[in-house]
Image (cartoon, coloured by chain):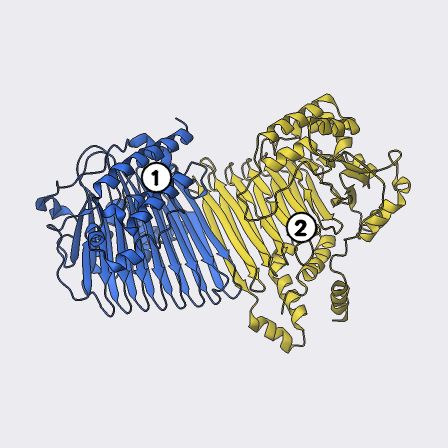
Chain colours: A yellow, B blue
Amino acid sequence: MSKDNQILEEFTSSEYKYGFETKIDTDTAPKGLNEDIIRFISAKKNEPEWMLEWRLKAYRHWLTMEEPTWPNVTYPKVDYNDIIYYAAPKQKKQPKSLDEVDPELLDTFKRLGISLEEQKRLTGVAVDAVMDSVSVATTFKDKLADLGIVFCSFSEAVQEHPELVKKYLGSVVPYTDNFFAALNSAVFSDGSFCYIPKGVRCPMELSTYFRINTANTGQFERTLIVAEDASYVSYLEGCTAPMRDENQLHAAVVEIYAAEDAEVKYSTVQNWYPGDQEGKGGIYNFVTKRGICAGDNSKISWTQVETGSAVTWKYPSCILKGDNSIGEFYSVAVTNNYQQADTGTKMIHIGKNTKSRIVSKGVSAGRSQNSYRGQVKVLKRAENARNFSQCDSLLMGNLCGAHTFPYIDIENSSAQVEHEATTSKIGEDQIFYCNQRGIDTEDAVALIVNGYCKEVLNQLPMEFAVEAQKLLALTLEGSVG
Amino acid sequence: MSTKSAKAELENIFNTHFEDFEKSLNGLSEKSTHEIRKSALDSLNHIGFPGNKHEEYKYTPLTRQLQKNFRFERFASTGKLKLEDLKDVPFYNENAHIVVLENGVVNTELSKVNGAQGLGIMPLKEAFKQNNEALANNFGRHLFAEKDAFAALNTAFAENGAYIHIERNTSVEKPIVLLYITTGSGELTYHPRNLIVAEENCEVNVIESFTSLNKGNAFINQSSEIVVEKNARFNYFKLQNESESTYHIDNTQVVQHRDSLFNAYTFTFDGALIRNNLNIALEEEHCEAHMYGLYLTHGKTHVDNHTVVDHKEPNSFSNEIYKGIVNDHSKGVFNGKIFVRQPAQKTNAFQSNKNILLSDNATVNTKPQLEIWADDVKCSHGCTTGQLDEESLFYLRSRGISLQKARNILLHAFASDVLEHVSISFLKEHVEYLIHKELD
């Protein structure tokens, strides 16, 4: 109990503990968006001609698109010309090892609880840290290279593995896909690239840490994961941002390509700054994530814990193209105060005997609105497709909302698709039971919520699971009463 | 032709029609009810016909279909229906209050309304003429034209249909049957409009049944407003079994008051394209609403059921079960919405949609949707789409029952879930007969 109390105390004293800003000189582009800015970003990154062309094509397409209004969220219109599209921590030259990285920067990551050095030594997780828009440090690169695994920042990949980037970039999320994917394709500044060769099982968790630091910047990173035949990789992603009154835009794209027999597991703990208790400030998290099970017997699994952001709008999806491929989606979305989340998944069954499983747990508190939106689509030739979806919502307080929008489109008679959803509040009897045993109400709520989310949290890698549990308790703190 | 110009063209046609329609009203166009018509037309011009990206009509591209199949030169005429035509029309000879509507117009000669105390049935046109007070208070007040283009279209041209009024403390013993019969040849359009007011403590059963005796394409755009007052009990049955060239859109808006009970049953069999919008507003506390639906489709039939239950006040209960068996090239669409507004604490709302696909060319699109703003609620929804359970089939076959027979037994069992709630025996028998016909 004493340990729990300590955790609780830790959280009562801090509302958003990642809300500091690091005073690091940054190299920024002027505000606004036009072809010159794109050329500027591309030139800064020393990109080849084809890359610039691709960006410009995306930008021209973006100009013809309209911002989507169908999500169940409301936010003031984003002025796309009032955003800095490129901000990089200033460094004299490329660091060769961690010792050369700006100590201030390392300190930032230490405060975030992802001390690069420490992680390197203790946990054996390879980390690629992205601050504002630029990847600042990647650990364990050499060790991974021995196995033929490429794990580096996106801009490095463009320089060193252009053929891979050229082949897979935009193959899962084309720049024409949607408004934010097009925007990202035009202005993305960095991100992570990961390539697992044939038959290799990645021995450690790969991890990216995203941090927005500079004011008025948008973060547009791009992650591309390619898993060749019979390979395996588990990938983690975490995010934080300083507390600011204005809203900041985060529009990322994640693409996963899984070849025959490959398996990719992608876990996210998203903890962007959610805005203060009056709903002021916070990150707009408009992300496109999609994986394709291109080969037979491949598997992609998404796990997400969404606790941050003022507005979240994301649907990690799986295209199950290969026969016998499997897609999974496990999600916990917690909203408090004025947060809004519209999140869910898409499972597109194309191949035969494809299976998908969706477990979504929403928790809403305060005045927040939490929506699940998902699609399960079984195409005509997807024989024996199987889907099970479960999306539950938990409501705390009478000013919040929980919404469910599942779309189920079936074109094959051998498909078996089930969807179930429930909405309820934490039972008074449950709380009473805990109280009776000397657990106070706040702890009881944390206990019950953790139990409710267990199915999803169990999917997370160990290091993240602990962090995620703490986060849940923190986000919901003060919401009972 | 692109959808955009198709939409504009449809709107144009109806605007011209409206001018003719106004002239035909002969002095009645000065009334307040006519203002509602005019504002409905404005709404229609404002929202326009739904395009193929419209969320509510995503799976049912109505505008394109209408554009393709209709020229809307005139509204359907009447006077062709004879007594002998009715001998094969289901329910005409049952012991009930029979209202015959030919192309949406009440035929008083063929109708058989036996005088019952506290029950008033008259053509809607008549009620408009009489300055009926309940009509003025309710017409166009519950069905919101600005929400749906077809409801707006119906309201703009509302003239014919049935007006039914059940006085307080009346228990209407015999069911009221509205027989809609489409007659004539060539393409037909009509917009039947009903208003049913069930006053305090009354009890009533209303059956609507649709039959086609026509040749050619028909577009029926029907709207109904139903008011269920305090402590009233209302059973509402709808049977849609029409010709394969009938396009049928139905908007039904139900308003329930304190302690009332409303049961809706929708049975859909044949038709080219059928779209049902069933909206129930639970305005006050302790209301109870049940919605049962069954659709058995084959050929190219397209059935779309959209339902909304809006819980506005605490302590209400709603339950919904829709089941579908979809065969051949047909398509089944279901969209159920449950809204629980912030004051509606202690709401219980359940929803389920189950589908069986019998053919690889058939499609099911379902979207069970919950939107909840209150915390002390119990809500759940579920939907399944699949085929017959292998194990159940095996069980039956291991007992010497042929595959065909075993499938039939299971499909009947699947459908009977909905049917067993029907209390009117002649209706139940007829639906059973239709199920047999469809499955065997």
How far apart are the two marked residues, 2 and 1, measured between alpha carbons? 44 Å
Residue closer to the observer: A363 or A267 = A363
Q: Nearer the viewer, mark 2 or mark 1?
A: 2
The relative height of residue A470 versus residue B184 in the rendered view (above or below) is: below
Amino acid type, residue under disc 2 in the picture: Ser
Q: Secondary structure at mark 1?
A: loop
The residue furthest right is A99
Instruction: Residue A130 in the image: state x and y as whole percent.
Output: 77, 41
Q: Residue at x 56, y 73 (%)?
A: A429
Quadrant of image for the N terminus of chain A: bottom right
Q: Residue at x 51, y 40 (%)?
A: A353
Question: On the image, numbered disc 1 is attached to which residue?
Answer: B330
Mark 2: give few (<14), some (14-19) or many (20+) Cα within 10 Å: many
The relative height of residue B339 versus residue A241 in the rendered view (above or below) is: below
Question: On the image, numbered disc 2 is attached to which residue?
Answer: A309
Instruction: Residue B157 in the image: state x and y as whole percent.
Output: 28, 43
Amino acid type, residue under disc 1 in the picture: Ser
Q: Residue at x 57, y 43 (%)?
A: A326
The chain to which mark 1 is attached is: B
Residue closer to the observer: A422 or B138 = B138
